[in-house]
Amino acid sequence: MARPVSEHVLEVKRKLIDRLRQNAHQPGDRFLSNRAIADQYGISYQTANRVMRELVSEGHLVRRSAAGTFVPGEASRLTGAVLLFDKRARRKESFGSRLLQKVGDSLNQLRVEWSVRWTDPDADLARTRLPDDRLPVLWNVPELIRPIIAQKRRALLLNDRAPSGVGATLIDSVEVDDYSGGATAAQLLRDRSPGGRFAIVAGPVADARSTSRVHGFLSLAQGRTVIAGGWYYEHAEAIAGEAIAAGPDGIFCCNDRLAHALVDHCRKHQLPIPPIVGFDNAPVAERLGLTTIAIPWTEVADSAAALVRLRLRDHHSTASHRVFAPQPIVRWVTSNRSSLP
């Protein structure tokens, strides 16, 4: 006489069916292994195997020889990437512009098809229709992350951290350690001007990158924070005098464009240029001879392109989250020769 099935095993089976009905897995996705089910639900491997066989026989799952157990249906095939970039990346020599160029070059080297779609922060991005056959690659469009997760889609975040929870299992990310970069800037200025009075020129108030860079600096040095309110030259122009007065012995600017405005302010008014550290290693930093915290652009772009190619080949592997440490480039600006046109 067959041994009756325990209530616990029946409950495990019900939970697995509910998991499928709630779209926790998409058509064509590999389902949990027998070992994973046994460990997660506290049953033996043999019992987990029996439950899986029942789910297959009832049509909830399909078994593929030498491959495993899968959700019925065909997985959508990804044929390329769509790069969804904030329209600010159209601005020449901006962070987004350089990131787009570098990632595009890396994708071309790997022969990955890609296209760009510009996003507008004033638009209702949550209703944006994304092509099913393209992997979304996002820069500075956080409004799209939630609907992508709700659709159980794969995506790649550039220069941003993947969300916690389910999102961390679906969304790959490539980012720069902004906190470490800010701390490195503090070390450079402390070595240059021990015990000096420092200032920090911050970018947008709500921008996580700016906030992290400021916090990293303040973890190793004291300084007065002056809010520029944006990432561009004109934002720093308005507060240049205040920042220079606040940091006569050294100033950390949260990107190179902000630093550019401070250097030009000193040159225009024939003021001594304090030690200034920027961030990004944008083209303007090299032209000025500016000390900066350099983003490893090639490594970031190549890593992003490699993750895109991985997703095109393997839709099921665990999400990857890669963090790159920025490196200091020391070349202190001292000349008062104006860089203004």
Image (tube, grey):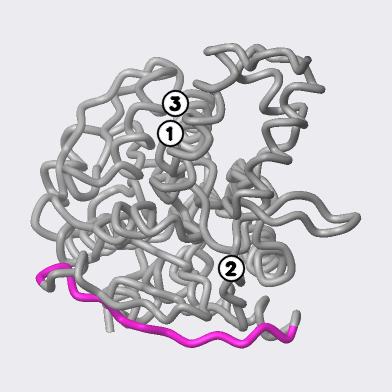
Residue visible at 36% across and 73% down in the picture: 85
Q: Does residue 120 belong to the magenta stretch?
A: yes
* Residue type at tag 3: Ser
Residue range corresponding to the magenta coloring: 111-122
- Residue at numbered disc 3: 193
* Residue type at tag 2: Gly
What is the x, y in percent for residue 194? Answer: 45, 19
Whole-number angstrom distance, CA of label 2 to CA of label 3: 65 Å
Residue visible at 44% across and 53% down in the picture: 334
Seen from the viewer's position, the closer of residues 275 and 148 is 148
Query: Can you tell which of label 3 and label 1 is closer to the viewer?
Result: 1
Residue visible at 75% across and 80% down in the picture: 110
- Residue at numbered disc 2: 73
- Which circle's residue, 2 or 1, is located before the other in the chain? 2
- Residue at numbered disc 1: 165
Picture quadrant where residue 151 is located: bottom left
Q: Secondary structure at mark 1?
A: loop
Q: Quadrant of the C terminus?
A: bottom left
Q: Residues within 10 Å of mark 3 (few under 14, many from 20)?
A: some
224, above or below 338, in the image: above
Picture quadrant where residue 306 is located: bottom right
Whole-number angstrom distance, CA of label 2 to CA of label 1: 26 Å
302, above or below 201, in the image: below
* Residue type at tag 1: Gly
